[in-house]
Amino acid sequence: MSKPNTSKPIGLARVLRWMLLIIPIVMDLVYHLWYARFMLIIGFIMLISFDNWDIYNEKIKKFKSRKNDTSK
C-alpha cells in the first residue's frame, strides 16, 4: 500500500528557477564558458528573491482574509 501523495505539486515557476541554476553549471563544466558563472550568480539572486516574494504574497493573502472576516 502506497501512502497518498500529500505534497504540493511542483509549479512551473519553481522548475524554471531551478533550471536557471542547473543550466549555467552545465555550461561552465561542459563548455567552459566564463560568462556562465555570472548567469549562476543571477540565478541564485532570482531564486532567493522569488522565494521571498512567495512568502510575502502568502502574508498579504492571510492579512486580507483576516480583514474581510472582521468586516462582516
Image (cartoon, rainbow, N blue to C red):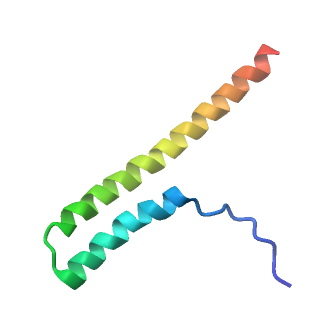
Quick check: 5 left or right of 17? right
Rendering quarter of residue 3: bottom right
In the displayed structure image, the side of residue 42 where residue 22 appears, left or right: right
57 in relation to 35, above or below: above
> What quarter of the picture does the C terminus occupy?
top right
Q: Identify the residue shown where x is 77% and y is 18%.
A: 70
- Kindly give the residue lying farthest to the left in the view shown: 34
Give the answer, above or below, for where 64 lies relative to 59: above
In terms of image quadrants, where is residue 5? bottom right
Q: Is residue 30 left or right of residue 13?
A: left
Q: Please state the horizontal and vertical placement of residue 4, each as a whole percent of the image.
A: 81, 72
Residue in view at x 39 percent, y 52 percent: 48
The N terminus: image quadrant? bottom right
Residue located at (66% from left, 26% from top):
64
Name the residue furthest top: 71
The quadrant in which residue 57 appears is: top right
Q: Position of residue 51 (x, y in %)?
A: 47, 50
Where is residue 25? Give x, y as percent: 28, 74
The mark total stands at 0
Give the residue displayed 75% in from the left and 65% down from the top: 6
Give x and y (percent) for residue 15.
49, 64
